[in-house]
Amino acid sequence: MSKPKHRHSKERTRKRRTHYKAEAPAATKCDQCGQAKRPHRVCPACGYYKGTQVKKIETLEERKERREKKQGPQ
Ligand SMILES: [Zn+2]
C-alpha cells in the first residue's frame, strides 16, 4: 500500500468537510389524517399504515386512566 506523501493542512481537511451536512429527514403526508410523517412508517399521529389502523394511539385521558389503574388507589 502506498502512503500519502504529505499530510493535509487543517484548512484543507476543514474545507472538504464543509460539504458534510445533515439532511432533513424525508417527510410525506399521512393519507388518513394529513399529518406529516416519514415514508414507509406508521403514522405517529393516527396509527394508520396503508389505510388500516395498525397501532392504537391513546388520548391523554386514556393514558391518564391507564396510569392510575397501574398505580392503584392511593
Ligand atoms: Zn395519520
Image (cartoon, rainbow, N blue to C red):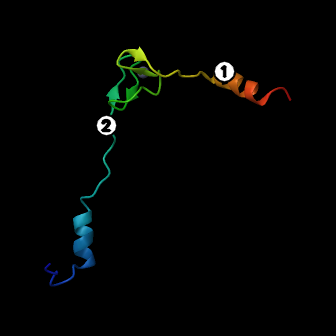
Residue 23 coordinates in the image, percent (x, y): 30, 47
Residue closest to the eye, 29 or 53: 53
Q: Quadrant of residue 11?
A: bottom left
In this view, 19 is above or below 57: below
Q: Quadrant of residue 30?
A: top left
Q: Quadrant of residue 74?
A: top right
Query: Reading the chain from its start, which is encountered first: label 2 or label 1?
Result: 2
| Image point (24%, 79%), residue name | 9
Residue closest to the eye, 38 or 52: 52
The reply to whether discs 2 and 1 touch (Cβ–Cβ < 8 Å) is no
Q: Residues within 10 Å of mark 1 (few under 14, many from 20)?
A: few
Look at the image and tell me in which quarter the N terminus lies. bottom left
Q: For the residue labelled by badge 2, is the local secondary structure a helix, a strand or a loop? A: loop
Give the mark count.
2
| Image point (40%, 15%), residue name | 52
Residue closest to the eye, 66 or 19: 66
Residue 24 coordinates in the image, percent (x, y): 33, 43
Q: For the residue labelled by badge 1, is the local secondary structure a helix, a strand or a loop? A: helix
Amino acid tagged 1: Glu
Residue closest to the eye, 14 or 49: 49
| Image point (21%, 82%), residue name | 7
Residue 35 coordinates in the image, percent (x, y): 41, 24
In this view, 56 is above or below 23: above
Q: Which mark is residue 61?
A: 1
Which residue bears the numbered disc 2?
26
Q: Residue furthest front?
A: 1
Q: Residue furthest bottom?
A: 5
**Left or right of residue 63, residue 36 in this image:** left
Q: Residues within 10 Å of mark 2 (few under 14, many from 20)?
A: few
